[in-house]
Image (cartoon, grey):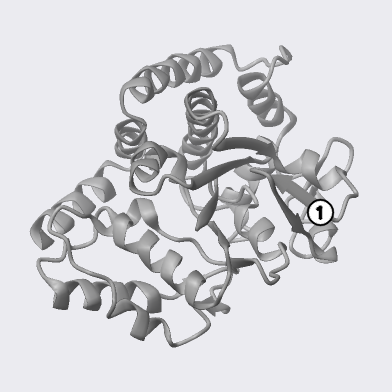
Amino acid sequence: MKGIIISGTARCGKTFLTENIKEDKTNSTYKVDLLLLQSLDFQKPKNSFELHKELTNYALKTRYVDSKKEKPLVLFKNKKFKNIIQKIKFEKEKVMPNYIIDLLDQVTSYNKRKKWVAADLNAEMIFESLKKIKKDLFLIVLMRNPVEAICASLYWRSYPNICQNSNKVFLYKLLSWKLTLFVAKKLKKKFPSSVKIIYFNELKKNSADNLTFFKERFNLKKSFFKKNYFDYDKQKGTFCPDKKWNHLFKESDVNLIKKLTSSEKNCQKYFLSFIIFILSNFFFLLAKINPLASKKFLDFCFFPLLTVKKFIYFFLLK
């Protein structure tokens, strides 16, 4: 059973790509985030009863795929997953990502499909561990134009207003984008046949209605080629949720992003550029040892109170 995870940063297009891959007789697509990274903090089951309860709660967990939180989705359309959960065996040494992948395999097999495709946030940070769980697991790291991804993160739930603490969120998203690309390149070297880096904007420029990756062909829906909110154009600015173009970023902000994510030199924020350069290299160094630790430390640096609260909460659960 081949499993393919489409991963990347927030607002990179991973869910959009997944939901626009046509299902056929050979593949199933799961159109909400798998939450594999978050599941590491779920309560670890101590027996079969707790395992089945935890997996049922996981499968029924609502994910919102729209900015206004009006379109709730769950992982499985077919309610028969509850019967499948009862067949998953408890093993003391396993953690929740093991069981979630087992569940995906078994549900896909039940539906008589040979492979599955699913989206997930930052799965690249734990892919090496996931690969040990499932040998025929593959990873696509989707990278969107950082100007678009960062802008979408700042405005997605609050447009036409910018989010709270926008300067902090701006820097956090910029560093997150750089860290994801660094980790993706590292994984690509270690697992050349199992990891692929795809640039979302280049993919959309291709008019072909199908994709081929990991020796598998997938057909795309026509809706994949429509214009996305927060698409960026140098002259027009950003394509906004009200279907109008607007300049949401200052030119200096755009130049800063371009300088720190490409080879462009046109940027006047020299001190800020230097600080971000130092921070990036620190997180890169840590990611060489442990990508997940680097991601968690990045979260802590920008959101210390929230990170500590989560740690205490999940520590008490365990």
Q: Residue at x 66, y 19 (%)?
A: 259
Instruction: Check disc 1 and give the amino acid type.
Output: Asn
Q: Quadrant of residue 61?
A: bottom left
Q: Residue at x 32, y 55 (%)?
A: 97
Q: Residue at x 35, y 39 (%)?
A: 299
Residue 88 in percent (x, y) is at 28, 71
The number of discs equals 1
Looking at the image, can residue 19 be seen? yes
Residue 35 in the image: above or below residue 293: below
Residue 204 in percent (x, y) is at 81, 47
Q: Quadrant of residue 95?
A: bottom left
Q: Residues within 10 Å of mark 1 (few under 14, many from 20)?
A: few
Closest to the observer: 120 or 194?
194
Closest to the observer: 84 or 237?
84
Q: Residue at x 34, y 41 (%)?
A: 132
Q: For this view, does 223 lie left or right of residue 196?
A: right
Residue 235 in percent (x, y) is at 89, 37
Residue 69 in the image: above or below residue 143: below
Residue 108 in the image: above or below residue 2: below
Q: Secondary structure at mark 1?
A: strand
Looking at the image, can residue 75 be seen? no
Q: For this view, does 65 lie left or right of residue 251?
A: left
* Quadrant in which the C terminus appears: bottom left
Q: For this view, does 94 lie left or right of residue 172?
A: left
Closest to the observer: 178 or 251?
178
Q: Which residue is mark 1?
A: 210
Residue 154 in percent (x, y) is at 57, 49
